[in-house]
Amino acid sequence: MKPATALAAGLALAVAGAAGGYWFGQHPAQEQTAASAQTDGGKPAPKLLYYRNPMGLADTSPTPKKDPMGMEYIPVYEGETSEEPAAAGTLRISTEKIQKLGVRTEKAELRSLDKQVRATGRVEPDEQRIYTITPKFEGYVERLHVNITGQPVAKGQALFDVYSPELVSAQREYAIAAEGVAALKNAGSEAQAGMKQLAESALMRLRNWDVSDEQIRALAKSGATRRTLSFRSPVAGIVTEKKALQGMRFMPGESLYQIADLSRVWVVADVVEQDIGLVHSGATARVRIDAYPDKVFEGRIGYVYPTLNAETRTVAVRIELANPGLLLKPAMFARVDIPVGGKGQVVTVPTSAVIDSGTRRIVLVAEGEGRFAPREVKLGARGDNHVQVLEGVKVGEDVVVAANFLIDAESNLKAALGGFEAPGQTPPVAKGSGHRVDATVESLDTQAGTVMLEHGPVASLKWPAMSMEFKLANPTQQSSLAPGAKVTVEFVERQPGEWVITSVSPRSTAPTPHAGH
């Protein structure tokens, strides 16, 4: 080798060595990790995929770097069991956790939403089949033929006999007028017309007093007035009210009997406000009565009342149905089912797939390989087991129908549930959904609902010991977070970079490892 060539090669090696030494000095942790991976047991080094944010944010880097707090990004190698960070707006769950949580999915599909509108009601008499017996003249109850409330009566059956001087006088007037018409049979036309007019006037008076045609014919035939006349039932039914007493005096318009025909009855059901739009006149309804658990009575909706009960937030719906054997008795409690058909095929998901926070509705869509995308959806009509999705999910997409709350626990649900725990209690946290660490309270901001903690290392997040700010899930937790207090806290990541304390308890006297789940 020539001297000039050898000198150039020596200089190149020296420069490379110096550069390598400088790089190793600046990145000792990564290089030592990679070197140990390459030489561990003589096995080939795993492939380096990327470096992930040490705080769990959805941020990766192809080269080593530090976050704004000075923490080194963590290398992720091919084949590692730790969960890879999902893309922004998605959740990533390992296959092992999916199996442990019992995650189950179903496809959003087109279907006709059939629903049963359920309501409670009571049996009532048909108001169109209730009759009141009211004399239109003054008189006295001479004799009662029906003397018991609840007694069944047939149409035309005598209820009571009455005596009235006015009635006797009217009978006598009609009898005299009828005799006069017969006597003036051969008289002039004017005399006959006047007498006929008098007879018709007396007859009309008797009919207006509800004297039956049979009694009028008997009066016209015999010409003899009767001291008493019988009032008869205008319909077959049940005596529901009886005010008449033997010998009592009554005045015109006074109600003496009330009779109800119960061969057909009403069931007035109270339908809740949100279901009333599904109910309409003419629809079929099924009625069940506790007294007859093996029977179903079918009827039709005759009327939807136009007013709402402000106290119960229900609308009355009238169902008309036959009453064979008079099994349905007024005031009975009734359970009503009204089948409501869907309006054609619509996109639906199972009801259990919807996570309702009160302000928005979320569905977790499975995107494969353990990735789940939360979608805000707009809901429509509801069926018994499915709900219509107007926006947010398409036909054929897989939605989580079981364990969706556990998947969501790493964000909103866990923090929300922590707010219902009493101070000092430590609720159980599902594995992988939260983290625990011992800490010392540095400061507390009651207005913002935040606390600054000096905590130890968190192994589940690969965090070193440091001081950082946390949010509180519940204002009642502030009583356990006085500055200087030694506590053990559990926390979750509600959204990227937002860490929320879900449970606070005094630190145990026994040493506990600074490790997460």
Image (cartoon, helix red, strand yellow):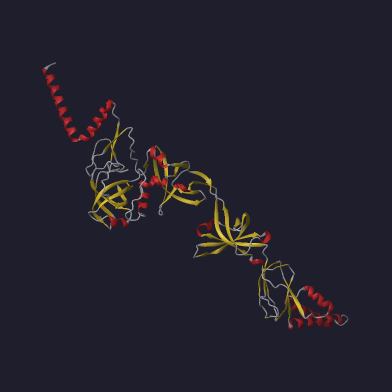
Give the image location of residue 156, x and y in percent. Answer: 75, 69
Which residue is nearer to you in this view: 310 or 40?
40
Give the image location of residue 306, x and y in percent. Answer: 55, 64
Give the image location of residue 33, x and y in percent. Answer: 24, 33
Q: Quadrant of the C terminus?
A: top left
Q: Is residue 95 left or right of residue 150?
A: left
Give the image location of residue 179, x and y in percent. Answer: 84, 81
Which residue is nearer to you in this view: 160 or 213?
160
Q: How many numbered marks does the figure carry?
A: 0
Which residue is nearer to you in this view: 193 or 238?
238
Compared to residue 413, the image places residue 175 above or below, namely below
Viewer can see residue 283: no
Q: Is residue 329 left or right of residue 221?
A: left
Q: Is residue 31 left or right of residue 474?
A: left
* Furthest-front residue in this view: 510
Viewer can see residue 213: yes
* Furthest-top residue in this view: 1
Q: Residue at x 37, y 38 (%)?
A: 94
* Furthest-left residue in this view: 3
Compared to residue 497, the image places residue 158 above or below, namely below
Which residue is nearer to you in this view: 48 or 44?
44
Compared to residue 451, the image places residue 44 above or below, namely above
Q: Quadrant of the N terminus?
A: top left
The part of the image, by quadrant, that contains residue 74 is top left
